Amino acid sequence: MKSKILIIGACGQIGSELTFKLRELYGDSNVIASDISYSNLDIVNSGIFEIVDAQNYASIKVCVEKYKIDTVYLMAAMLSATGEKYPMKAWDLNMESLFHVLNLARAKFIKKVFWPSSIAVFGSTTPKEYTPQYTIMEPSTVYGITKQVGERWCEYYHNKYGVDVRSLRYPGIISWKTLPGGGTTDYAVEIYHEAIKNKSYNCFLKEGTELPMMYMDDAIKATVDVMMASKENVKIRSSYNLAAISFTPKQIAESIKKHIPEFKITYAPDYRQDIANSWPKSINDSYARQDWKWKHLFNLENITQEMLMQLNKNYSSALNKSK
Ligand code: NAD
């Protein structure tokens, strides 16, 4: 029997692309997209869509029972930069939603859970280069604290109650379909939009700020791979380190200049610089590569090529429609 899947937070940057991929794999009628509002019409109009509030246990349970859901991907969260503006809201959303889904699994309403963690679990006392899976973790943002605590609870629910929960520490995710939702790595998406629209970009991080990043296709592939892996191969039940590439704003600007020679970047670091300074520069993801054979496909050159090509198409077709 095919899985019946619920995606919570399906209108967001990652949830939206995950929805399309899972529909391709499991069939439209087996993948229910949900969010707190109708904020992404491509998702709302592309298949079954329900309003579900991740902070309301009953709201999730009604949907789980209505569609006989066995697997939940919990993608709703408040991200790092927005979380620093609204710390208590970030804490409430990120923790309550996780407990609701873990408790649904503990009560056997669902069988399997995916919950994303982040490189934000690390802090300024963590080794910055090739950060190991097991290391010092003293996150300094409220977002990082929620992810660190969430990881502990995932492992606890797995060990104590046998909950099949799987998790990845995503790096910054780069994509062209949906705009990012308030993270510190958002610059690496904005820069491509601005390169096409204005041939310039004013970056909110300093030129040498190196951070771990990944193209959306790789992030979706990792998510599908870890969820499809056999139970025995998913040996880490807190969250797996996951990596593809690392680069600085200066390096991404140079890769854009190869396609748009007149492109100019300027720098005006803001409060997000402190967040970025507390995160690793690169990640050692050897456990993911060993346990369930993770392999990334996209490097910076491929990403720049793809992003510029796809966004160029989008902006030209929007221009043609407005004529
Ligand atoms: P996003 O902000 O783009 O999307 C989050 C979605 O959750 C939005 O559509 C929002 O409407 C929805 N949402 C908010 N409150 C809700 C509620 N109460 N009930 C239901 N839905 C609600 O986020 P994203 O970038 O797609 O991130 C998805 C997950 O991946 C998050 O857990 C995030 O922490 C993690 N992550 C993302 C990145 C990244 O670079 N995008 C990096 C590391 C980890």
Image (cartoon, grey):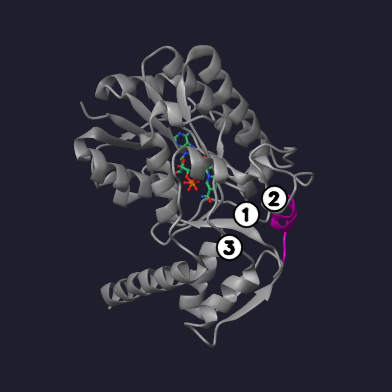
Measure the alpha-carbon separation of dots 1 and 3.
7 Å
Q: Residues within 10 Å of mark 2 (few under 14, many from 20)?
A: many
Q: Quadrant of the C terminus?
A: bottom left
Question: Ligand 1 within 8 A of label 2's CB?
Answer: no
Q: Position of residue 100 (x, y in %)?
A: 48, 21
Q: Mark 2 belongs to which amino acid?
A: Trp
User: In the drawing, does residue 56 fall left or right of residue 183?
Assistant: left
Residue at numbered disc 1: 184
Outermost bottom residue: 262
What residue do we see at 59% from left, 30% from top? Answer: 151
Nearer the observer, 5 or 34: 5
Q: Amino acid at mark 3?
A: Tyr
On the image, the x and y values in percent for residue 65 come to 30, 19
Q: Are marks 1 and 2 in contact (CB under 8 Å)?
A: yes
Q: Nearer the viewer, mark 3 or mark 2?
A: 2
Q: Secondary structure at mark 2?
A: loop
